[in-house]
Amino acid sequence: MQSSGVVQPIEKNVLLLGAGNAHLGFVKRFGMQPLGGVAVTLVSEYPVIPYSAMTPAHLAGDYTWDEVTIDLVRLCASMKVRFLAARAIQIEPRAQRVHFPDRPPLSYDVLSLGLGSLAVCPPSLLGAPNSIIMRPMGPFVNRIAALDDELRRQPRPFHLVVVGGGASGCELTLALHRRLAKHTGLRLTLLQSNARLLPNFPERAATLVQREFTARGIEARIGTRVTDSSDGSLVLEDGSRLPFDAVVWATHAAPPDVLRAAGLSLNPSGFLQVRDTLQSVTDDAVFGTGDCVSFVSRPDLPKTGVYAVRQGRVLFDNVAAYLRERPLTPFRPQPLYLSLLNTADGEAVFRYGPLVLKSRWARRLKDRIDRNWIDKFKPVGPLAVPLEAGAEDWQMRCGGCGSKISGDVLSAVLKRLDVPDDPRILMGCRAGEDAAVHRVRPEAFSADPGNLVEVQTIDFFKSFVDDPFLFGRLAALHAVSDIHAMNARPFTALAMATLPYARGPVQEAMLFELLSGALRTFRELGVVLTGGHTTEGAELALGFAVTGHGEEGRLFQKGNLQPGDQLILTKSVGSGALLAAWMRGACRAEWFEPLTAGMLQANAPAAAIFARAGVTACTDITGFGLAGHLLEMLDASKLSAEVQAERVPLYAGFREVAQTGILSSLQRDNAKVGCRVHGQAIPPPSLFDPQTSGGLLAGVKAEQVATTLAELRAVGFTAAAVIGSVVPSDPDTVPLIQLR
């Protein structure tokens, strides 16, 4: 059991690129058996992925979407693995970095590639609206659902062609027939370039599937290769043409594009060449699993999920051994393995070695195996992290100035950051001085220099997400929000960052991500980062001291509410409970994505709209929750408010997690003002939920409400709503919130 108060330093970073079966097994194993001093990151373009073995049955209507999908946001949060929904565009093994289009690169000590494979499609049909590629499976399922809906709304003769007669192509074709056969005029054709269906199966399996095709009126054309397309027809190798309305590509596997320029050894088909230890033949720090690899010792090993599942345990053990400089063990694929092919009629084709049969029993067996596999990735709490030798040494790290981040780390990060220049800054973070200096010329800051005032604020908190880049963006937005809430313009920011105990290179990578995220926000808002202070501690934390400017007499103030003002809230509330759920592995990806999108919305446009509407009273909704911050305004204005609780916009998922009892740790303290909220025996929890990067709450004159709401929604504040109004307060009582 982990000793109380002991913090394990981060020594190594493991990066899992792709959410293949082996990587899912690695994540699960890491959550149950953490590697001391190792941080793991899983990167997948999609936060929710369907299990490929169950996807055809979902298309056929046997399973719901939730039954066949793995929520990577929940899984990784529960396993204490960092998850990033991102697409890799470059692998740089020499620098041990992976690059992405819209965020800083990720550094690694070990990289594992589980990117799967792609279906081959003629260039002329890539991206065409009538061309549907089987992988990745999530977008493919959405395309089929859209096609089903289109044929329901616009019935007509429709020719759907499936290209590829392997196991995936045959199983998908039968599932698509069951899904779409209800549409009158549907014609379904499968094209197979090989001499028969299912070339990697015994011939009896091909006979059984061909029999099903014939019984259902599906045409299977064997020995037919597609070479191109033209004018709504597929061009075949023999020169003939096949007209089609849509085509599904379930062809043989092609390697992911990102492998081509990585400088790693590839086989003639472009797949990563690996040894039996799953390591790249050219780089021991790079591992590979699943369909994107080719074994040097077994170049003809079939690309099947059965092997990828078993590779997960070997991958975990070998990565741990590599990091500890211990011998690695080889992956030994089993000579025989079970295959079950769903025929979308309540039966399945069973194949084990030469044995082949088709039965309902086989379908029930497939259902049990598939459900058992996917149930492994339903989030559960991780076990305690074990300590390794030497961990206690980190408890003797110095405090005070001795806890500052190494000068080498800080210098390296500053050299890599793109900090913009500003003529008003005399000495900024690149000057190397002990403080930032900016020129005090009022005309450079305001069109009304005679009324220029300086506005300052500070904010600091520990990380509430596991992505330093995202945390940097949100921390910067949260810090400048107080400036916008007063109708001022943020100008400079000083950073205060705490990095977890780690090796210098690990801290450098983390600090670079953190400040890169903050700089992205600051650049968008015209804020200059002029310096800061770094230290190390148990947890990642970040804050900013922000200086801004405004005009005296034009500032928003909490005490300027007037009776009759309509209360407009610009963003949804509920981030506190949802972030608490995320930390427990209970926040679904479909909730987490809109939550982060909402928190990333800057309040600057809303403040400008309120200023044009003549608003004088405004605040931002942050840690004290909606009720707490509204009461601050009411106390300062000596007024009360009537609030329609049902009009308060909520983030998706808030009600669900709140009903399960998952609330922010600050909720109880915030709810102490509940005695001043009347009208319901138990006020809704949304009133007391603390917000991170929350919206603005302003008092707007009734005649300006319609225009203001229209302008807010036009610039992206789609949740903006009138939640109540300001009313006179009984002079003998404190201001109250009356729920209506």
Image: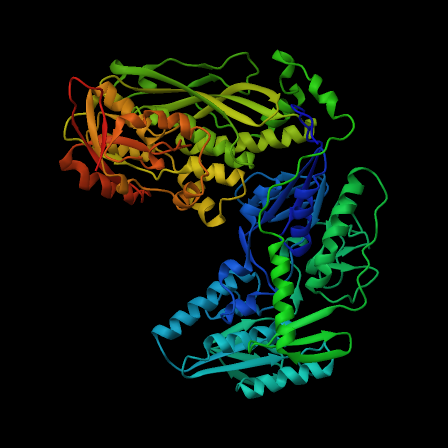
Q: Is residue 86 above or below residue 569?
A: below
Q: Quadrant of the C terminus?
A: top left
Residue 130 drawn at (x, y percent): 47, 71
Q: Is residue 712 above or below residue 631?
A: below
The residue sitting at 77% across, 74% down in the picture is 353
Residue 264 drawn at (x, y percent): 74, 51
Residue 271 in view here:
no
In the foreground, 622 or 499: 622
- Horizontally, residue 235 falls left or right of residue 564, namely right
What colouring does the structure picture have? rainbow
Q: Quadrant of residue 387?
A: top right
Residue 539 drawn at (x, y percent): 59, 27
The residue sitting at 56% across, 76% down in the picture is 346
Q: Is residue 578 above or below residue 169?
A: above
Residue 333 in view here:
yes
Q: Quadrant of residue 402?
A: top right
The residue sitting at 72% across, 52% down in the picture is 312
Q: Quadrant of residue 710?
A: top left
- Horizontally, residue 617 falls left or right of residue 539, namely left
Q: Quadrant of the N terminus?
A: top right
